Amino acid sequence: MNKIDLGKTKINKLLLTFSIPCVISMLINSIYNIVDQIFIGKGVGTLGNAATNVIFPLVIIFNAFAGLIGNGAAANLSLKLGEDNKKEASKGIGQALVVTVFVSLFLGIISYVFLPKLILMFGCTKNVYNYALDYGRIICIGTPFMIIYSSLSNIIRADGNPKYSMIMLVVGAIINIILDPIFIFKFNLGVKGGAIATIIGQFISFIIAILYLNKFKSIKVTKESLKLDKDVFRVLGLGLSSFITQGTVLVLFVFMNNVMTKLGALSKFGPDIPLSVYGVISKINSIYISIVLGVSIGAQPIIGFNYGAGNKERVRETIKKVLMINVIFGIMFNLVFFIFPKELAGIFITKDDPSYDLFMEFAVLMCKTFFMVICLNAVEMTGSITIQSLGKVKKATALSFIRQIILFIPIALLLSLVFKKGIYGILYAGFISDSLCFVVALFIIGSEYKLLGKKDYNNEEHIYNNNSTYNGKHIVVTISREYASGGRYVGKILADLLGVNFYDKELIYLASKESGLSDKYINEIDENKRQTENDDRIFIAESKVIKNIAKKESCVIVGRCADYILKDNKDTVKVFLYSDDNNKVKRAIKYYGLNEKNALKEINKINKDREKHYKFYTNRNWKDFKNYDLIINVDKQGTDKTAEIIKSYILNN
């Protein structure tokens, strides 16, 4: 099997590799809740469904913290791997693990102790109270398992193992599905049975997640990486958008639970039916949300890696394709909600339930008003996740915040209370806020997409397609030179004298196209600074570029082991240029801005790095003059004279 390369493998293949397992993983999380809802609805009825809906805000809270830590660590891992900074990548994962354990235990204890007050805050009615308490207490016991495996699932995907993450969640879900009917019907445990089945499945997923800690592919978790410091806030900051997204969902859910019961009590539906219907239809909608978020989160390693490596074109391509996929799914779900509302709602209730008719009537009403344009939500959700992958937390957070908080709640209150539309005003507010948010999301994503299209400098200036020769001869001159010896300037003068193309920094852009790394990134770790594992990719890319140029045209090439790369090319003249220390220091101060006091030390360091780099890739000594045709002291001849000497050598050989 070919190795997956985030910087070069086709985007379509990468999305299939990462997003499909991620979608399945996200769907499994939805299935946990939906399966409970179905079995509890069939076994307990409307009040049972309402009870799971009342507890769902707790699940959102747990997922919010799992996303804060897991998505933050995953985004950090992808960005740092793109930058090839494995130490920081490992540190981010280690700190995330420590924080996850503490947070999950704390939330589990707090939620269990304060559960009676919490469920009232979440919109619980008198009829639903005991069911919600029975279900919620058991769910709280499983809190640490749920948060830890959910957090790790994001990290595992970013480590390049989405299949493991998927299997981890699928196994837990299957166990939950098998145990639900056993505990609910056979043991007659009702809502308690559904909760027990859920936490057993979560525990199994937790065990599988923990087993992965010794299987990381891209990094190694060490004791040192587990130490907390202020950098943990930077890592968590990358997951803040996910946390805010879940936080806004929480606010929306609690708001909806409360207005459903209060305004529902003033309508023919009563308080319990709207609460129950909103819960079950929202669970179905969570399937759509899971697909959109799954595709988007699956794309995070691709976007994060390429953005970290500076390859903005691949980032743009990924965002464009993710948006297209998610909008298509949005349209499909929109049609299902609009055409089959009764069939969807009927999954969660039996026909002999006393509230069946009103339940179905409200379900149809909700699907055709509140969820009328849910396809538009795909743009907002996709934008929030992809912008977060770029490390732009504030923009991503703002996008998450707009729909639920800034738009929906004010519009809902305005329609229901000011215009006295009651519960119908809440339903109308859904499609109005979705439509407005779509417009805002398009603007934000469009502006970010446009920024990604801007180039750091005009690369086209550095492309040469001239098949030039010198006096009818095909000739390539390679110039190796000490730092600050004037070698690059000599090369430029020589190229002008010969009337051929000159390649130095120009090779960076060409190598970026070959390697999949950005020109900016390659420039930052140019040959005298390279200390990363992307070195091999850069060297191979530059070698291909140099060989192609040398084959097509006469030219002058400076540095990059070109003398070695073209050692078998009979048309190559290999030159080494050097200078005395005093003149190198003068040039370094004048042209490169080095401090006079430390100039010689810095020059020697750079030359030492060049020597090591050359030795590593050629197994030769950089200053072994047997490797060159000409060795010239630039100071004794001067730059112009040195170029003339090289030209004369070419004419006479």
Image (tube, rainbow, N blue to C red):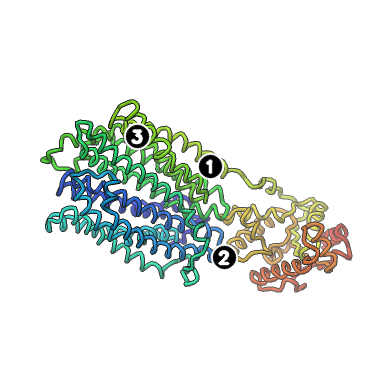
Among numbered discs 3 and 1, the one appearing first in the sequence: 3
Name the residue nearer the viewer: 359 or 113: 113
Q: Position of residue 120 (x, y in %)?
A: 27, 46
Label 2, label 3: how many angstroms apart (C-alpha)?
50 Å
The amino acid sitting under disc 2 is Glu
Q: Position of residue 186 (x, y in %)?
A: 12, 57
Q: Is residue 632 left or right of residue 84?
A: right
Q: Position of residue 634 (x, y in %)?
A: 85, 64
Name the residue nearer the viewer: 59 or 348: 59
SS category of the residue bearing label 1? helix
Q: In which quadrant will I find the C terminus?
A: bottom right
Query: In which quadrant of the rendered view does residue 203 lie?
Result: bottom left
The amino acid sitting under disc 3 is Gly
The amino acid sitting under disc 1 is Tyr
Q: Which residue is mark 3?
A: 430
- Tag 2 and tag 1, C-beta contact below 8 Å: no
Q: Which residue is mark 2?
A: 533
Q: Position of residue 165 (x, y in %)?
A: 36, 60
